[in-house]
Image: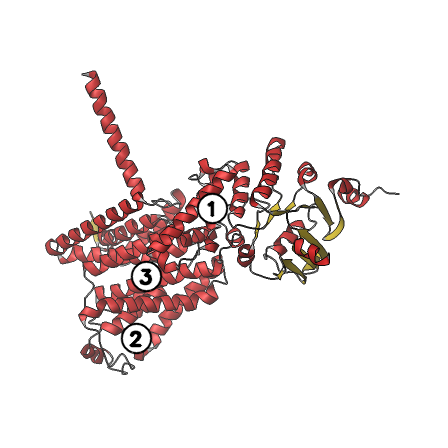
Amino acid sequence: MERRRLHLVLTLALIVVLFLALWWADTHLGEFPLRVARTGAIYVVAAVAYNLVNGVTGQFSLGPNGFMALGGYTTALLILPLQQKQFVWFLEPLMWPFNSFSFPGYLFGLAVLLGGVVGAIGALLVGIPSFRLRGDYLAIATFGFGEIIFVLANNLIRLTNGPLGMKGIPEYANVYWCFGAAVLATLVVSNIANSSYGRAMKAIRDDEIAAEAMGVNVFRTKMLAFVTSGFFGGVAGGLLVSLITTISPTLFTFGMTFNLLIIIVLGGLGSITGSVVTGLGFAVVSELLRVVEAPIDIGSLHIPGVPGMRMVVFSILLVLLMIFYRRGLFGQFELSWDWVLSVLRVTRGVREWKRERKTESS
Amino acid sequence: MEARTQDGVVLTLDHVTIKFGGLVAVNDFSLDIRKGELVGLIGPNGAGKTTVFNIITGQYSPTSGRVIFEGQDITGWRPDLIAAIGIARTFQNVRLFTGLTVLDNVLVSQHLRLKSSFLSAAFQLPGYVQEDRDARERGMALLERVGLADLAREQAGSLPYGQQRRLEIARALATRPRLLLLDEPAAGMNPEETTQLMKFICRVRDDFNLTIFLIEHDMRLVMGICERIRVIDYGVSIAEGTPQEIQSNPRVIAAYLGEEEK
């Protein structure tokens, strides 16, 4: 089909442009904006995957922090240099086999990929019992999973170093890795959402009983969405620990899931476009809102800095959104080449029409 | 002779009983439906008609008894496997995928035939792309045949009620069934729409080579198109026969209108 080829060319062109822009940013921008951008890209990876479960398939999961933790710890254990490992595990030794090797920098991609695989395996193991449940019960079961991972991370000292976590993780996650993963996650998830499998997922969201009666294997379809989201959750976790170079259980508490929930609800449940835009936006706005956590003097009134105030702002934003704009910024809208081209065609049409009118009147 | 009549039977319900707690919703229900037949199931509200459908399509497992489709015992199978083997249904209250387009609703029903793997869909590999294109063509062809092609890109939830009913039948047809179960297809329709629906059902049966089993309260539709009618009341079969026989059956009249006190 002509159209499909055109779309493919446009997509590839956009990716090339994006990476040229990243190259420019990497060489011209300072450390701080790049850091924010990388964080945003990682949020995109996690949010797009989370949206496949919550938005596209309509299953209310609260477990993405668990998948990110699995991926984060896996990648950290694989890339932490041996010397650093000896230094970090000073109370109890690190368990075999992680005490005997460390991936060099050029295997960072493999380490992140394996983080994704462990996240996917985690999703498989959690999904099998959890998807016998629906609605609120599913939310509680997946929430429990996140908490279990948290407790394990705190107590499996020989694997995770407990509450102390790890320091000195090499910072391999540059803009190319982060945005590369974001592009890959977005493409793969939107391919899935627009495929026959995605239609089956949306059918389950709209009416599970009817979907089953039309021959959709409900359990398997939910699992496919969940395992995919576990994989990209793991990838996001792996990138994140390499970005901030440390890991500890508190990095992956329920607060992380809450952030992702804000992102996908703000963007519009089921809208991948929305998750991408709000994922990047969330990272930027969180930085801008640091202002509200600093001490403020208004005349004689002195407000001391309150850490965590940003989350209050986000929470208020979420409440307002739920009251006034429940469908999120994008609803279920998806940016597609068809849409872009039709807009261009309309604007061009209008311009030509205006020009014609001008020549007629003169 | 025996073997030949056996061959013609598409669906057999063999002494099916289902209990919900103490309530016997369907009691010792047996029925044979032959290939190409158009059979009606009627009865007062709460008689257990939809429960019979739910047993056939696997939403419920019967407490006892068997469901046999084309010689295969499908009792207790999962609904999606029953759809795959060739039984499709519509619902009493329309249950479309309201957020999807008309075309996508029909495409969901083709998912069960998809051969390409999940990964080939995720990476849009040529095999999947080709299969999806074929499915779309088949979906559009089906919409043409049922007269919904113009609405293919509309959201299913935004269609007028009569069209939603029609789409639900089209969606069931897209699973390529050999037996179609229609649960009150004329519910909420005006007489004009019902007349159209009657023609539509007969045409669909002939075009798609189907056997149809339907539940309906609209007696004009039931008496007009069904060749054979089964009546149940309180989960028990009370009569079976041609439309003429049913109309004059005293037990049926009693079930619908109540018995005269003597």
**Percent x, y for residue B144?**
48, 38
**From what the image shows, is residue B52 above or below residue A227?**
above
**Residue pointed to by mark 1:** B105
Label 1 vs label 3: CA separation? 29 Å
Query: Comparing marks 1 and 3, which lies closer to the viewer?
Result: 1
Quarter that holds the C terminus of chain B? top right
Q: Tell me the amino acid under the disc marked 1.
A: Asn
Residue A232 circle label:
3
The local secondary structure at tag 1 comes to: helix
Which residue occupies the foreground of this view, A262 or A111? A111
Q: In this view, does A108 lie to the left or right of A50?
A: left
Q: Nearer the viewer, mark 3 or mark 2?
A: 3
Q: Which chain carries label 2?
A: A
Q: Position of residue B110 (x, y in %)?
A: 47, 51
Q: Residue at coordinates 67% horizontally, 51% vertically from top-left? A: B34
Q: Is residue A83 in sight in this rendering?
A: yes
**Chain letter of the residue carrying label 1:** B
CB under 8 Å between callouts 1 and 3? no
| Other residues around mark 2 within 10 Å, as few (<14) / some (14–19) / many (≥20) | many
Assess disc 1: are there few (<14), some (14-19) or many (≥20) residues with their C-alpha within 10 Å of its C-alpha. Answer: many
**Amino acid type at mark 2:** Thr
Q: State the residue position of label 2.
A: A160
